[in-house]
Image (cartoon, coloured by chain):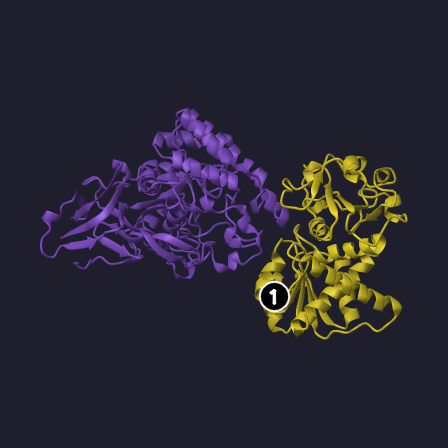
Amino acid sequence: MKTLLKGGRVLDPSQNLDVIGDLLIENDQIVEMNGQEKLEPGDTIIDCTGLWVCPGLIDLHVHLREPGFEYKETISTGTQAAAAGGFTTICCMPNTDPPLDKRAIIEYVVTRAASSESGGIFVAPIGAVARGMGSDHLAEIASMKEAGIVAVSDDAFPIQDAEMMHQAMQYCKMLDLPIATHCEDLSLTRGGAMNEGAMSAVLGLKGMPRTAEDIQVARNCVLSISTGCRLHVCHVSTWGAVETIRKAKSLGAPVTAEVTPHHLILTDNATDGFDTNCKMNPPLRTQKDVDALREALADGTIDCIATDHAPHSLHEKQLPFSEAPFGIVGLESAVGLILTHLTHTGVLSPLQTIRAMSTAPAEAFALGGGTLIPGELPAAQITVIDPDLEWTFDVRKTFSKSRNSPFHGWQLRGKAVMTIWGDEVYRDGVMDARVSTQ
Amino acid sequence: MSLLDIRSLERSEIETYIREAIKYRNACTSGEPVPQVSGTVCLLFFEASTRTRASFESAARKLGLSGSFVAPATSSIQKGESILDTVVTLDYAGVDCLVIRHPSPGAPHKAAEVFDGGVVNAGDGCHEHPTQALADLLTIISRKGTVAGLTVAIVGDIVHSRVARSNAWCLTKMGAKVRFVGPLTLLPKDCSLLPVEPCDNLAAGLSDADVVMALRLQRERMNGYDLGSLAEYTQHFQINRESLKLAKDDVLVMHPGPINRGVELDDFAADSTFSAIHNQVENGIYVRMAVLANEFDKLRGDA
């Protein structure tokens, strides 16, 4: 059985490829470009005219909430949301309950992901740096690597002690694992709810200064240079952090970085009115920061776009602003937001867009995806995007269990319409393995 | 329907509140019957309060409103109920108007999203305290005749002060110039969206001021890094006989209370004829009568 994706705009940053062509899938694998002559009766042809055919999108920063917080999200609903958003691979953060800090928990997540409704979507767990998250003892990182982690992270519990981070990096260097860091000096952000600036002064909310991020990004870059450990800076939000990452890269540091759609599009002015759907960590910053993030993404200083998909229940987000939890859902709005506000506006080319959402994340965590090269991957990982589809993001109709998004009701142009893993094809998030002949 | 902050009010709305407050003050002080309002008001206070609570209770009583007071220590909040569930419950219980004090900025705004009646913000964290600003405005107008063209120096712990923010919006909308004066550690880090001139030097801040409003040091919201010591603050930022010489000769001294006597103010500043502190308290009742009456007018569709 073969499937031909016919006549699409094939965008593959791994080959610097941007052509109109056909892609042939056979026995789950991409076998070649432009192989229409090899089709037989009963094979499937999918008309991709006017659509982008890209390597499957990869999100390095997702919170699946299972185990422990299944009322917000489960592995099953999270992977369905991923499929609907065009992601073939998602990396899940370890701040669950219990946290992902042991081999057995990693095995649990891997097993649950494989048996979920969107089992074709690859879930790559990220292990905790510290035992129990937030403690001062390293977790059993080597054992977790054997069980399938692709990185470790202190997300939500940024390591404050420099010696501990230094040792963690040495350990991860030995294991050739990247360490993904949420960079925040907690002594500067205690009690903070939003960016410290003019808007926090108006609203009377305790601010989180950008220096809290800048300081830790700088420290971690220095430690990365010192240890040679691969450092991945999560959700960069300040112009100062951008400058530091740029400098570190120029010095040859093995540093990668990600930015979220919301930090690329919104400023702290969005918090006016106390909408808790605009409460995230790091907080929404200023236009100067947004401009710097966009420029850094375009020039490659920031490598990846990641959603930091962080589901929270309605009753939690209905709390007063300073008491509500940080975070928003992002898997199903990311493509539309990025295409509408960065690609169609000329900040990123289509190839740069796909590089930031697929090829670069694959490289950062050595995930093995992010390419359409025939035979390169054991199973095809492809996302088909309609770049001109105009639609309205309705968070109530998403697959995620949670509804916390500031983008509800936004008019968007561009949407992932098909997500393919091997012979599993998801259309608008629903698996449709039997593709009709057209 | 609700009074949640001064920032979103039009100047004409502020003028209406002041006009109504003067009407109630005249009625109360002349012994004439005060126009009565029927309905129920609930004071939902999630923070300790003496003067604001007493002021609202007095205002409600003078208007003939039936009311109740709910504090978290005696409410279902202790049992884990959220503020929004509490508010919805009070809505179904037939309460017409809520007066909310809460330590979190924006809490009354959240409540107003789910409460059908009127919501009055009685102070939300470090955000706003609109009825206090209206009381202060009425006090200045009563003592100075007008507020337009005056320079008002608000001195002290600005960053933690809801009174400072509400007054900044209120006074500037009415034509005054407002300075925020205090040590840099107690000023907002960025005042560019506030209609004020920040100043970390008392002499410069009080220069030619028509009104000096001292604020309490909110030590419960501070950490150990905000000040060298109370004595040092007193030495450099206290409003007293000496520092008032920097302001205009007919300067008006105000303080929303409670006063840390000997810290923000000395006895001279607090008790001399320059002081309008007691007027602020009294005017607070009339302003709150106007605000509550306005909420009930709107509920009846009269406003």
The answer to which image quadrant residue A172 occupies is top left
Colour applied to chain B = yellow
Which residue carries the number 1 mark? Answer: B87
Horizontal and vertical percent for residue B243? Answer: 84, 38
- Choose between B260 and A303: the one closer to the eye: A303
Quadrant containing the C terminus of chain A is: bottom left
A370 to A97, vertically: above or below? above
Colour applied to chain A = purple
B91 to A373, vertically: above or below? below
> What is the tally of numbered marks visible in this picture?
1
- Choose between A383 and B191: the one closer to the eye: B191
Q: Look at 17% across and 52% down and name the residue there.
A: A3
Horizontal and vertical percent for residue A261? Answer: 43, 46
- Choose between B257 and B175: the one closer to the eye: B175
> Is residue A181 in view?
no
- Choose between B291 and A122: the one closer to the eye: B291
The answer to which image quadrant residue A431 occupies is bottom left
Mark 1 residue crowding within 10 angstroms, few (<14) / some (14–19) / many (20+): many
Q: Is residue A186 left or right of residue B141?
A: left
Disc 1, SS: helix
Amino acid type, residue under disc 1 in the picture: Val
Q: Is residue A185 left or right of residue B99?
A: left
> Is residue A34 in view?
yes
Horizontal and vertical percent for residue A418? Answer: 28, 53
A305 to A415, vertically: above or below? above
Q: Look at 79% across and 35% down and name the residue there.
A: B203
Horizontal and vertical percent for residue A266? Answer: 49, 47
What chain does mark 1 sit on?
Answer: B
